[in-house]
Amino acid sequence: MDVAELIWQVKSADPKIAEPAARSLRELARIDPAVLTPWRKDLLQVGRDAEDLRVRWNLTVIVGKLSLTRTQRASAIDWLFERLRDESSLTRTFALQALVDLSATDSALRKRVLPILENFAREGTPAMRARARKLL
């Protein structure tokens, strides 16, 4: 299956279609994020609109791995900071991971993310604390 088909599927309202597509896209992002560059606008939009928790998890991780334009990056960072307030602790953890990924080449973002990371390491769920300690 090609990326265009996965993008189409991840937009589905049916979680039985969207969630496996999101997992496949996440795996592609892990292996070669550049493959997703032509679809970054779609991925950002779907991430913002996703209602299914598992689709949101996967797209949150993907966003941190994308090569983004300046405007897309600013939008993605805003969205990820919003995800830090998500009801799902796993979504919050993945948003933090994505922010750390994006901050690798952005010292200003790193300065914003570090206190949040330290807070997660002290006060999050056990999984959040473990991930934050690893990221620190």
Image (cartoon, helix red, strand yellow):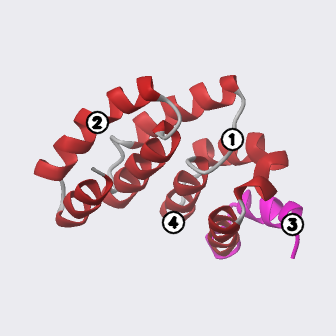
Residue at mark 3 to residue at mark 1: CA–CA distance: 16 Å
In what element is the residue under mark 1? helix
Q: Is residue 110 above or below residue 24?
A: above
Secondary structure of residue under mark 3:
helix
Label 1 to label 2: alpha-carbon separation: 27 Å
Q: Earlier in the sequence, mark 3 or mark 4?
A: 3
On the image, the x and y values in percent for residue 121 come to: 17, 51
Q: Is residue 25 left or right of residue 109?
A: right
Q: Amino acid at mark 2?
A: Leu
Tell me residue 120's x, y (percent): 21, 48
Q: Find disc 2 in the rendering and name its residue.
A: 114
* Corner quadrant of residue 89: bottom left
77 or 49, nearer to the observer: 77
Range covered by the magenta-colored residues:
1-19
Q: Which residue is mark 3?
A: 5
Badge 1 or badge 4: first in the primary sequence? 1
Q: Which residue is mark 4?
A: 54
C-alpha separation, residue under disc 3 versus residue under disc 2: 37 Å
